[in-house]
Amino acid sequence: MGRPLTGKTHVGIRRETRSNGDVYVYERVTGYDPKTQKTKTLSTRLLGKIPAGSTEITPTQKEAFRSYRGTRPGRPHPCRTSKNPRVGRS
């Protein structure tokens, strides 16, 4: 008899080396899927990169851009604007 399933997730750090020597550092959250009986990646997030010849992680995106990305309103669809001559016709 095996251990009972808890549904816990595991957070790990993965380092991926590119051909130019830069190392990209990712945070990966994994969990067990009892249906397929395999470990599944739930999410992956880029933490930053370590340039070749350095030992410190540098962010790949600016913090201002990260906070602005989700708040920008989208453009309305062209058919829904009042400048469209076909709007309101029947």
Image (cartoon, grey):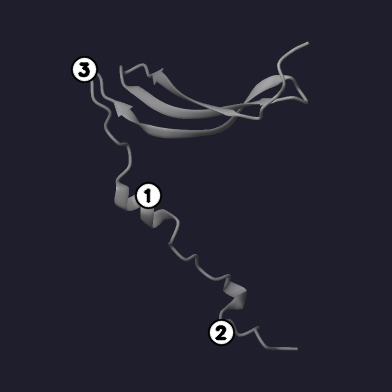
| Residue 68 in which image quadrant | bottom left
The quarter of the picture where residue 26 lies is top left
Closer to the chain start, of discs 1 and 2, is 1
Residue position marked by numbered label 1 in the rendering: 66
Q: Nearer the viewer, mark 3 or mark 1?
A: 1
Type of amino acid at the residue the image marks with label 3: Gly
Left or right: residue 84 compared with residue 24? right
Q: In the rendered view of the protein, which quadrant contains the N terminus?
A: top right
* Circle 2 residue: 82
Place of residue 49 in the rendered image (x, y in percent of width and height, measured from the top left): 32, 28
- List x then y, in percent, for residue 83: 54, 83
The residue depicted at 46 percent of the width and 35 percent of the height is 45
Q: Which mark is residue 53?
A: 3
61 and 85: which is toward the camera: 61
Q: Nearer the viewer, mark 2 or mark 3?
A: 3
- Residue 37: x and y in percent read 74, 19
Q: Secondary structure at mark 1?
A: helix
Residue at image location 75% in from the left, 89% down from the top: 90
In the rendered structure, the answer to whether residue 56 lies left or right of residue 2 reads left
| Crowding near the residue tagged with mark 1, few <14, some 14–19, many ≥20 C-alpha atoms within 10 Å | few
For the residues marked 2 and 3, what is the alpha-carbon distance in whole angstroms? 57 Å
Helix or strand or loop: what does disc 3 sit on? loop
Q: Neighbour class for label 2 at 10 Å: few (<14), some, many (≥20)?
A: few
Left/right placement of residue 86 relative to residue 48 reads right
